Amino acid sequence: MPSDKPVWFVTAASSGFGREIVLNALGRGHLVVATARKPERIQDLADAGADTMAFDVTSAQETIDATAKKVFDKYGRVDYLINAAGYILEGAVEEITKEEVFKCFDTNVFGTMSTTRAFLPGMRAQPVAANGVRGTVVTFGSLGSWRGGAGYSAYGMAKGSMSLLAEALRPELAPFAIRSTVVEPGYFRTGFLNPGAMVQARARIDAYEDEATPTGKARRALKLTDGNQPGAVKKGCNVVVDILTGTGAAAGKEFPVRVVLGKDCEQTIRDKFTSTLQILDEWREAIRSTDHDDVA
């Protein structure tokens, strides 16, 4: 039976942003389908009122399609599709294997695409909501979407993909009154960098363990950052849900293609713009010299 309340579908709801988005949406009286690979890890969300189910974004497309059908059969619509699944793979390019990179992309990139692909037919077919929007697709990028660095090449590539996916979905889905955006957090105090959550390359090369190298410094910095991140997850998720629902901090503002969270992420983006403009200015003549002579 179609719901008269907004319906959320959230992946990776057992921790971090996924979990807090679920709790925030529930607190606003919305209906939430919270998922995790192991449903027993989100029993507390069920107790809080969420509809919980097992869901693995790396499953076969047929399995993911079946989950989407089950949700639409039960609720009639999905207003907010939150692709929160992801993890960091730490390792120098010389250390990480093709298999490790594939697994990282399978969760961070391919899983998001498979989930989005499964839910879009139902979202396109559902009625437009009272706010004039048929649905919203959310991906998760990060500060790493904007800055590559020693030790996290695979993660940076994956998160950059998520930001560009949201940008690509925006014009594709606009004719159907479906919006897309990417959430780009800086360092937030989640379990993301915990030893049990952060995946490290199995191969470790002594040259990159040296803390005199950028990779060695980055490894030490990640350890020191764990548990000391400046971002508060509940505050970040409140901003996210405000923006998605057009309330609170987002009331009266245009829906953004990027939801940037944290002073550190803001500064990283500003620095990226500055350094990129410097490159364009320094190399302007060389850049423009490559066109055909008859091009204005």
Image: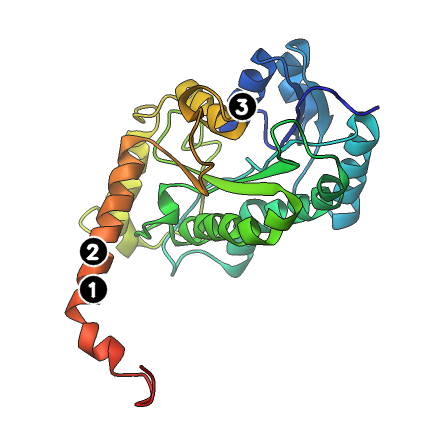
Where's the N terminus, which quadrant?
Answer: top right
Where's the C terminus, which quadrant?
Answer: bottom left
> How far is the residue under mark 1 from the one under mark 2?
6 Å
Q: Which residue in the protein does label 1 denote? A: 279
**Looking at the image, is 194 positioned above or below residue 163?**
above
**Does residue 58 appear in the picture of this structure?**
no
Query: Between 193 and 166, which is closer to the camera in this rendering?
Result: 166
Q: Position of residue 151 (x, y in %)?
A: 34, 50
Mark 1 near mark 3, Cβ–Cβ under 8 Å?
no
Of callouts 1 and 3, which one flags the residue occurring earlier in the amino acid sequence?
3
Residue at (77%, 36%) from the top-left corner? 67
Q: Residue 21 got which mark?
A: 3
User: What type is the residue that disc 3 sits on?
Assistant: Ile
**Looking at the image, is 282 positioned above or below residue 127?**
below
In the rendered structure, the answer to whether residue 87 lies left or right of residue 293 reads right
Q: Which residue in the protein does label 2 denote? A: 275
Of callouts 2 and 3, which one flags the residue occurring earlier in the amino acid sequence?
3
> How far is the residue under mark 1 from the one under mark 3?
39 Å
Q: Position of residue 282 (x, y in %)?
A: 15, 68
Mark 1 near mark 2, Cβ–Cβ under 8 Å?
yes
In the rendered structure, the answer to whether residue 258 lies left or right of residue 213 reads right
User: What type is the residue that disc 1 sits on?
Assistant: Ile
In the rendered structure, the answer to whether residue 273 lies left or right of residue 73 reads left
Q: Secondary structure at mark 1?
A: helix
Q: Secondary structure at mark 3?
A: helix
**Does residue 143 appear in the picture of this structure?**
yes
